[in-house]
Image (cartoon, rainbow, N blue to C red):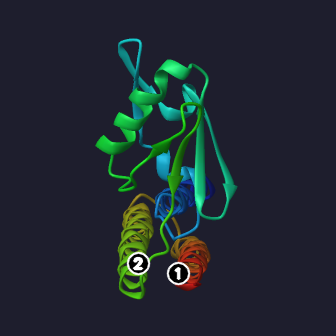
Amino acid sequence: MIDVKATLKETEERMQMAAMYLEEQLSRVRAGRANVAILDGVRVNSYGSMVPLNQVANVSTPDARTIAIRPWDKKMIKDIEKAIMDSDVGITPENNGEIVRLGIPQPTEERRKELAKQCNKIGEKAKVEVRNVRSDVKDKLKKAIKDGLSEDNEKDAEAELQKIHDKYIKMLDDLLAAKNKEIMTV
């Protein structure tokens, strides 16, 4: 027999993962403001092994349009520049011998709309995952009736499932709305 509470708890955890996925993906979208998260995927060749940028340098945002990367070892500057150029960040680094700087350009109106579309695509992917989780659990509940779960319990569980679903869809919509506002703000 199915444990309804455990199933709903597991459902909520899976939906939470979809929300975390969306949050992480949205943080990587460059919205015209300097954000160190856009460098999360950059790997630097450090003494023969590829390591994340934040393990060989201090990454900070001194102002809204600049990311400063201060390597702990000055010899790493060329490797850091190369890693940024090879990544999909799309910004050319400048250095003064001590610090690598990334100037974040102001996106055009067209580019902002493109970014908003990209965010909405990512958001839709997360919503589909939440809906798939709901669908899976609904199927489990329908099968549980055959295994002896009462129809009343199944209906209650389904209502609770719908509440959880609605909560996470609203959360995803709020995350998207905040990101779109950030992107469209000049």
Check disc 2: other Cα within 10 Å, few if <14, some if 14-19, many if 20+. Answer: some
Residue named by callout 1: 180
Q: Choose top left, top right, bottom left or bottom right for residue 8.
A: bottom right
> Disc 1 residue type?
Asn
Look at the numbered discs 1 and 2 and tell me whether their residues touch, using CB distance below 8 Å: yes
Q: Position of residue 34 (x, y in %)?
A: 58, 60
SS assignment at label 1: helix
- Mark closer to the observer (1, 2): 1
Q: Who's the residue at 45% across and 76% down the image?
A: 107
> Disc 2 residue type?
Asn
Whether residue 131 is situated above or below residue 91 in the rendered picture: below
Question: Could you tell me which quadrant the C terminus lies in?
Answer: bottom right
Q: Is residue 91 left or right of residue 20?
A: left
SS assignment at label 2: helix
> CA–CA distance between discs 1 and 2?
9 Å
Q: Who's the residue at 41% across and 29% down the image?
A: 78
Q: Position of residue 134 (x, y in %)?
A: 44, 69
Whether residue 154 is situated above or below residue 112 in the rendered picture: above
Residue named by callout 2: 120
